[in-house]
Image (cartoon, rainbow, N blue to C red):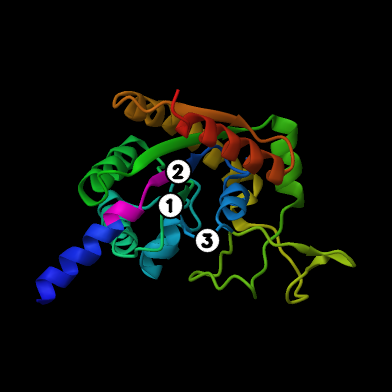
Amino acid sequence: MVVTLKKAVRKRGVLMLKRAIAVIGPPAVGKTTLTMQLGQVPGRQIFRLREHVPKTILAATATSAEQLGWIDDITVTRALQGYIESVVSDDTTHIVLLDNFPGNDTQAQLLLSILHKSAPVCVVTVVELAADAATIQSRVRERRVCHRCERDPIHDPRLPAVPNPADQRRCSRCNSVLHPRRGDAPRLLRARIQRYERAAISIREAFAGVGIEILQLESNRPPEHTACELTTRLAIRSTPS
């Protein structure tokens, strides 16, 4: 009886999870902001890898320009597998937004493999954001995080905070002083940009190899405009010709 019930729950989850949208791009291009915009709709969840791995592993990658944020493949496999299985068993989620994932071709292949087994009807869409250098530098200078609102496991918040209109130095939610992101320090930012540029080639090839076309989007405009454009283009792609 228990086994039958579990199979029924799993079947509902497989049917509910219709789309996985992977959002990739260089640092400060607007990936997290875009997924936060899109994730406000009921029935959607956001996957951020660092939220699903042990604190000790995050801490080991936090300070080196060579290892900044990089997580080994075994840990990634466990984290992604566990997350997808939890979504599949949840009959309320029909879209998963993957923020800054996959980070390399191995992770791209892993994502496709896990979804194929756990949610075979799920359509994978890959969105690569791009912005000009001036826009990226401006965002790096301006963006701030809140250490009080975002309880990051290694005290390295990543989610963009909303400044208080009355005092741009403070958080609009808790009025705490906002701080630059640790990874936006010039040395670390350069290393992250270079790492993405190297990885992006193999990521594109991994998806192209299975017939998945990457949707290229310019993100120089305000985030709500980028979200609107993506929603429109996805709707057009989903409409039978």
How many residues crowd mark 3 within 10 Å: few (<14), some (14–19), many (20+)? Answer: few
Q: Compared to 135, does 211 lie above or below? A: above
Q: Is residue 17 magenta?
A: yes
Which numbered marker is on residue 21? 2
The secondary structure type at the circle numbered 3 is: loop
State the residue in front, 195 or 65: 195
Which residue matches tag 1? Answer: 96
Distance in Å between CA atoms under marks 3 and 1: 11 Å
Q: Which one is closest to the eye, mark 3 or mark 2?
A: 3
Mark 2 and 1 residues: CB-CB less than 8 Å, in contact?
yes
Which residue matches tag 3? Answer: 42
Q: Compared to 165, does 187 lie above or below? A: above
The secondary structure type at the circle numbered 2 is: strand
Residue under the point 37% across and 28% down: 212
Residue type at the position of mark 2: Ile
Which numbered marker is on residue 55? none
State the residue in front, 210 or 72: 210
Q: Position of residue 49 (x, y in %)?
A: 41, 56
Residue type at the position of mark 3: Pro
How many residues crowd mark 1 within 10 Å: few (<14), some (14–19), many (20+)? Answer: many
